[in-house]
Amino acid sequence: MKSGITPFGLVTVAWLLLACSNADPTAAGDGNEKFTTWGETFIETGIPANSNGQDGFIDGWSLHYDKFLVNYHDIVVADGAGDVAATLEKPKFVDNTVPGRKTLAEFDGLKAKNWEKVSYQIKPAVLGEDVVAGDASDLAKMMDNGWSIYVEGSATKSGASGQVIRKTFHWGFKVATQFSDCHHEENGTDTLGVVVTTGSTDVTELTTHGDHLFYDRLQASPDPAIRTALRFDQKAAADEAPYGNGDGEITLEEMCTEPIDVFTYDPSGLNAPTVGDFVIALSRTIGHYRGEGECTMSPIGERLKNPCLEL
Ligand SMILES: [Ca+2]
């Protein structure tokens, strides 16, 4: 045979053409969308001290989470016209101190295209949730207390005379939050929602950010020179007189009696008169999207004037 194309070569060319057509999300076909969650290193291993304030606590504290419990509800994949491709059947309970990415849902056989409207909710635990990771007894405790998020852990810092100061915390939050119009940037392109491609599985991580509870602003400054920093001093002070009982455990109730230091913390025009109000307001912001991606956050249901009144 003089032909340069062998039968094997023809098969290879045909396979390549098929592969190319499969990679085209506009071609007719189906694909899958998988949702996972991950707590990143701040929740898995801890938040260190770091003088830059972004990679750790600017005031010398370091913190370790023993539990970081979240209840995910109502994941929805839809398009701009309102056609719904998939919805989460049962809410999912997860402890994100359990290492690695945990699967929340797998939606198979979705039409391959850009589904622009992806949303989810974090709200209080309900009967019949799936335990994705963590203890069923913790889920029961969340249901009994009406919590959507619960964090437990300890923070330490070296005192003036070299002694180690240690504070523990066990905080349950009742906030219910809708995360809508989720989007993320990848390779310089901002993508709204998800892109399902024929014959493959796209993975969306509903990331939880454990550092947000300790932000010193409720909203990012429009001035990029003003960076949000992580702080713990005022939370630790809530356990001391005149606000707390000095037993080493910082309670939300103690933080809700301590006025926020407006010279250090910026409520960004929102209502957060106490340290407790500030932390509860920040608990709405732990939900992210594919790493550093974001969603539009809105409270579900009636919102009380001060977050501390929801305790
Ligand atoms: Ca205390």
Image: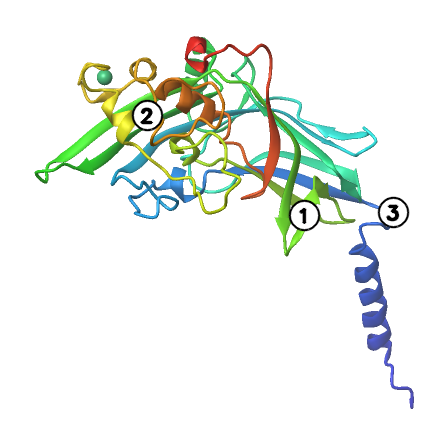
Q: Quadrant of the C terminus?
A: top left
Q: State which mark lies toward you, 3 or 1.
A: 1
In the picture of the structure, the residue carrying the numbered disc 2 is 261
- Residue drawn at x 46%, y 22% as measured from the top left: 281
Q: Amino acid at mark 3?
A: Ala
Where is residue 102? Give x, y as percent.
52, 37
Name the residue: 72% across, 49% down. 200
Looking at the picture, tell me which residue is in the foreground, 191 or 124. Answer: 191
Q: Position of residue 126 (x, y in %)?
A: 54, 14
Q: For residue 190, which numbered disc appears in the image?
A: 1
Q: Which amino acid, by three-letter code, is at mark 2?
A: Asp
| Nearer mark to the viewer, of 2 and 1 | 2
**Quarter where residue 106 is shown:** top right
Q: Looking at the image, which residue is at 31% across and 42% down?
A: 58
Looking at marks 2 and 1 on the same chain, the residue that comes earlier in the sequence is marked by 1
Depth check: give the residue in front, 100 or 251: 251
Q: Quadrant of residue 265?
A: top left
Q: Residue furthest left?
A: 161
Between discs 3 and 1, the one toward the N terminus: 3
Q: Position of residue 26 (x, y in %)?
A: 84, 49
Mark 3 crowdedness (10 Å alpha carbons): few <14, some 14-19, many ≥20: few
The residue that disc 3 covers is: 28
